Amino acid sequence: LLSLTRPDVIEGIHRDYLAAGAELVETNAFNSTSISLADYGLSHLARELNEAGARLARTACDAAEAADGRPRFAIGVLGPTNRTASLS
């Protein structure tokens, strides 16, 4: 949820990792699925959270790459849900 409410904090974390030498940063979207977010009444924000996370990571990567020419990558992440997909 911080990707929407405090994007400055999330982008700052990405910038710090990239400045320390990271070539990859993730989108801060772990468990941002409608299924997982349902427990918090936030299912309707799943797409917005994922888009914001990707945008923040990519923006930080672009800035780092522009500064020194080294390519940086924003990588997506998909966490497990809190629901069982099947019953054996």
Image (cartoon, rainbow, N blue to C red):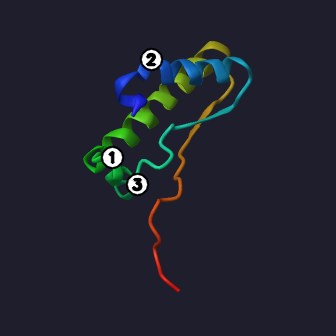
Dot 3: within a 10 Å radius of its alpha carbon, few (fewer than 14), some, or many (20 or more) residues? some
Is 78 placed left or right of 44 in the picture?
right
For residue 53, which quarter of the picture?
Answer: top left
Going by the numbered disc 3, the residue's amino acid type is Ser
Going by the numbered disc 1, the residue's amino acid type is Tyr
Residue 36 - label: 3
Q: Residue at x 46, y 73 (%)?
A: 85
Going by the numbered disc 2, the residue's amino acid type is Asp
Residue 40 - label: 1
Question: In what element is the residue under mark 3?
Answer: helix
Question: In what element is the residue under mark 1?
Answer: helix
Query: Disc 3 and disc 1: Cα gap in Å?
Result: 8 Å
Question: In what element is the residue under mark 2?
Answer: helix
Is 27 placed left or right of 42 in the picture?
right
Is 16 placed left or right of 1 in the picture?
right
Query: Disc 2 and disc 3: Cα gap in Å?
Result: 24 Å
- Quadrant including the N terminus: top left
Q: Nearer the viewer, mark 2 or mark 1?
A: 1
Sequence-wise, the earlier of marks 2 and 3 is 2
